Image (spheres, rainbow, N blue to C red):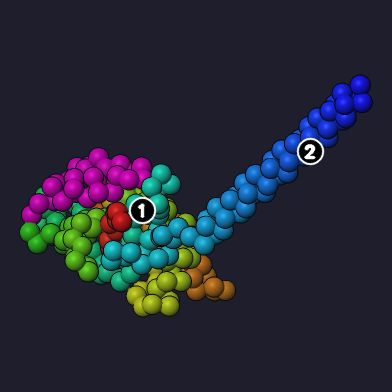
C-alpha cells in the first residue's frame, strides 16, 4: 500500500514539473517572437525608402512617387528654361486655330505633349511642348510638358523642390509656367509661383489661363518633366 502511495506521489511531482517546463518554453518562445518583431521594426527604421520627394534622380528633382511602386515616379528639371508660346494660329508654331482636346488628369501630360507636337508640326517648333519633347539632360530624352494635374502636384511639392535647388544649384520655381492643358480652344493653363516674403522655398502657387499665342515677352516659361523607374 505504501508503495502505491509513493508511486502516486512521484507521478504527481513529475507531472507538475513537466507543466512548468512547458510554461517556461512558451515564455521563451514568446520572448523570441518579441525579439524578432523588434528586429523587424529596427530593419524598417534603418532602411528608409530608396527615393524621397526632393531627391535628385535620373536628371531631375522628384516631385511625385507612385504609392503602388516606390521605385517609380516623376521628376522636374532643376534648370530654368526660357519663355515660349503655347501654340496658336501663327506661323511660328503651326497653323492650328482649333482645340487640341488635351486632358487635365494626372498622368496624361505625355499624352498631351504628343498631341500638341503632332498638331503644331510646322518649323521652327518654338512652342513649350516642342521644347520639352526635344529636351535632353544627363542622357535622358523622354521629357514632356506636364499637364494641369501634374503641375498641381509640383505645386504641392514646391518646398522640397526649391530646397534641393537652393542647396545644389539650379533655378527656383518662380514666375509663370505653361502646362500642356488647354483652358479652351484659344487659351491654355499656366501655373504661377510667387516667392514668399518669409521663406524663399515656400512659393505661393496658383493657376490661370492665357492666350495660346501669348507673346514671348509676356513671361510664360517652359519646364520639362519625365517619369523615372529605378
- Report if residue 159 is visible in the image: yes
Point out which mark residue 71 bears. Answer: 1
- Give, as a single range, the part of the protein colored magenta: 97-122
**Quadrant assignment for the C terminus:** bottom left
Mark 2 / mark 1, whichever is N-terminal: 2
User: Residue 227: x percent and y percent?
Assistant: 29, 54
Q: Secondary structure at mark 2?
A: helix
Q: Is residue 81 magenta?
A: no
User: Residue 190: x percent and y percent?
Assistant: 35, 56
- Residue marked by disc 2: 17
User: Residue 35: x percent and y percent?
Assistant: 62, 52
Residue drawn at the location 40% of the way across and 73% of the way down: 165
Q: Residue pushed farthest right?
A: 2
- Report if residue 218 is visible in the image: no
User: Residue 88: x percent and y percent?
Assistant: 19, 52
Residue drawn at the location 69% of the way across and 42% of the way down: 25
- Total numbered labels: 2
**Pointer 1: residues within 10 angstroms few (<14), some, or many (20+)?**
some
**Quadrant assignment for the N terminus:** top right
Mark 2 to mark 1 CA distance (whole Å): 55 Å
User: Which of labels 2 and 1 is toward the front?
Assistant: 2
31 on left or right of 61:
right
82 on left or right of 69:
left
Residue drawn at the location 18% of the way across and 60% of the way down: 141
**Pointer 2: residues within 10 angstroms few (<14), some, or many (20+)?**
few
Classify residue 224 by image quadrant: bottom left
Q: Residue pushed farthest left?
A: 123
Q: Is residue 117 magenta?
A: yes
Between residue 62 and residue 32, name the one nearer to us: 32
Amino acid at each position: 500500500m505504501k508503495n502505491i502511495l509513493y508511486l502516486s506521489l512521484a507521478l504527481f511531482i513529475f507531472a507538475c514539473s513537466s507543466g512548468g517546463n512547458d510554461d517556461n518554453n512558451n515564455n521563451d518562445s514568446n520572448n523570441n517572437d518579441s525579439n524578432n518583431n523588434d528586429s523587424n521594426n529596427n530593419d524598417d527604421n534603418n532602411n528608409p525608402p530608396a527615393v524621397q520627394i526632393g531627391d535628385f534622380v535620373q536628371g531631375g528633382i522628384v516631385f511625385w512617387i507612385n504609392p503602388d511602386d516606390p521605385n517609380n515616379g516623376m521628376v522636374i528639371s532643376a534648370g530654368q528654361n526660357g519663355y515660349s508660346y503655347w501654340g496658336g494660329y501663327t506661323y511660328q508654331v503651326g497653323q492650328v486655330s482649333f482645340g487640341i482636346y488635351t486632358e487635365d488628369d494626372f498622368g496624361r501630360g505625355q499624352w498631351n505633349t504628343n498631341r500638341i507636337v503632332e498638331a503644331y508640326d510646322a518649323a521652327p517648333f518654338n512652342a513649350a511642348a516642342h521644347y520639352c519633347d526635344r529636351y535632353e539632360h544627363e542622357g535622358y530624352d523622354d521629357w514632356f510638358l506636364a499637364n494641369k494635374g501634374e503641375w498641381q502636384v509640383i505645386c504641392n511639392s514646391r518646398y522640397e523642390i526649391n530646397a534641393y535647388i537652393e542647396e545644389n544649384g539650379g533655378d527656383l520655381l518662380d514666375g509663370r509656367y505653361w502646362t500642356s492643358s488647354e483652358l479652351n480652344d484659344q487659351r491654355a493653363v499656366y501655373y504661377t509661383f510667387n516667392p514668399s516674403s518669409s521663406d524663399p522655398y515656400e512659393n505661393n502657387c496658383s493657376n490661370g489661363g492665357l492666350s495660346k499665342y501669348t507673346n514671348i515677352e509676356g513671361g510664360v516659361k517652359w519646364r520639362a518633366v519625365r517619369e523615372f523607374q529605378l
